[in-house]
Amino acid sequence: MFIMTRYIFVTGGVVSGLGKGVITASIGKILKSKGFSVTAIKIDPYLNYDAGTLRPTEHGEVWVTDDGGEIDQDLGHYERFLDITLSRDHNITSGKIYYSVIEKERRGRYLGQTVQPIPHVTDEIKNWIYRVSKESGCDFTLVEIGGVVGDYENILFLEAARQMRMENPGRVLFVHVAYVPILKSLGEMKTKPVQHSVKELRAIGIQPDFIVARCEGELDDVRRAKISLFTNVDQRDIFSAPDLEVVYELPLIFEKMGFGDRILEKFGLRPIESDLSDWEKFVDTLKNSSKVVRVGIVGKYFRTGMYSLPDAYISVIEAVKHGAAYLGFKPRFEYINSVDIEEDPSLLDKLDNVDCIIIPGGFGATGVEGKIMAINYARENSIPILGLCYGFQLMVVEFARNVVGLEKAHTTEVDRKTPHPVITILPEQAKILSEDRYGGTMRLGSHKVILKRGSLAFEVYGREVIYERFRHRYEVNPKYVDVLEEHGLLFTGMSEDGIKQLGELDRRLHPYFIGSQFHPEFTSRPLKPNPLFRALIAHGVGRR
Ligand code: GLN
């Protein structure tokens, strides 16, 4: 079938960090709830090829796609809100664009021409968007342009978007998301920054069709009128995105304000009733449930002041919300820095106040002993615990040391000379690292996992074959599997080539002590929580 894709570009103004990803995903969600198919692309103007080598405390979590892309976390919002699976190509960076242009130039594709930002780079950007849209075959493609209008680094992406409007009359809209501050000293909402950012956008030839005002509270009529006057955007097309306790509420707010139908109208389509009833119930539970589950996260990517907290573990946090809401609970998080535990072990007492614990993924030596102490505490006190990737590997280390009696057992990632390398580098990874090839070379993306019948994992998933996403270089050392299993740590999930993908403590020893080499947080969706999280919450609240 031939589909005339419609494009919605989302740009940012005034400051970054406005939650454009959630806003883009929410627009997609309302269109989807009206029966359309929707896909989304994220543009990151940085020169890194992908997000794989970025520091988590600075850039937040790295999202892993089914096909092994390491991407900005906004793709996670898209997959969660829209319940879709995206490929790595749904993320465009300047690095990818330039890489491709230069490669073509070297292969003689532009022979004779002077290769220039316009048209060659902009063509590359447009063709990428067209190609991905065509492959997706959706009614709508949302394209979020990272950064802020006025930045040097996203100018060519904005120019490509401007050209796309010209090439597709009536099929391209622009949504501009800008910050409206409330000045504390005046107690007043100020619209001047929005006015200026739209002026900037218009200077590069883009008149926005919609404005989303990001503000602490709702936009009032006076400010709406003022923004409209100075930006040439109809008052009916200015929406506010207030601060929300539960971000999943945003599509509901947008839909109530009529955003979806205004979009359809501008594309020349008839208004359509949306169906968001399941979503409403989900949001209502997260906002209003009187039943609370307390979840401890023992990690290390918490920056001082704890400002970047939700960012580095965002998918883990969201997956907990999905699992909790499914069971009618609202989660309350306790964040514990494993580095602090090492300095002050009495912090482990905090774990007495949670219903269940998660040890998320990570890299390197920092905070590892603190995580091992937390695992030990959970194991000995029968607190339900889920280890993710590094968390799983450290469960194995803890068990080897304290139950099997292999005193100095470790992962070779931290201690290369350990007498008991219970976690060791995957053979193909050793080669990759010896060649200094760090970018995009881990064992990545979705792989098949076969669960052992009768195991806890099998019971949790309710089936034998699952697909989950991976991002690692190390694995359980096959040489230690027998001795670990003899003592009660059972490996109940396997890859087809024999890598241990999942471990659990014998149920006679602990109610829920389970770790996965994969990252179940990447496949969790609001209305379809990942089973490992759902079961963790169920065991946590069941213990009371
Ligand atoms: N550092 C570990 C490895 O590379 C775990 C990675 C992770 O937690 N994502 O295997």
Image (tube, helix red, strand yellow):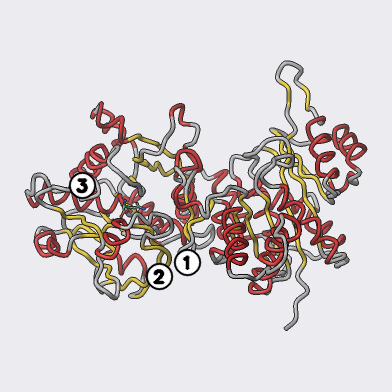
104 vs 300, nearest the viewer: 104
Q: Is residue 448 left or right of residue 51?
A: left
Residue under label 2, please give it: 467
Q: Position of residue 126 (x, y in %)?
A: 72, 63
- The answer to whether residue 31 is seen in the rendering is no
The residue under the point 12% across, 63% down is 479
The residue under the point 37% across, 42% down is 297
- In space, the residues marked 3 and 2 are separated at their CA atoms by 27 Å
The residue under the point 85% across, 62% down is 166
Tell me the amino acid under the disc marked 2. Tyr
- In space, the residues marked 3 and 1 are separated at their CA atoms by 32 Å
Which of the labelled discs sits on residue 321, or is there none?
none
Tell me the amino acid under the disc marked 3. Arg
Q: Secondary structure at mark 1?
A: loop
284 vs 52, nearest the viewer: 52
- The answer to whether residue 389 is seen in the rendering is yes
Residue most extreme to the bottom: 1
The first of marks 1 and 2 along the sequence is: 1
Q: Position of residue 404 (x, y in %)?
A: 8, 52
Q: Residues within 10 Å of mark 1 (few under 14, many from 20)?
A: many
Residue under label 1, please give it: 66
Nearer the viewer's eye, disc 3 or disc 2?
2
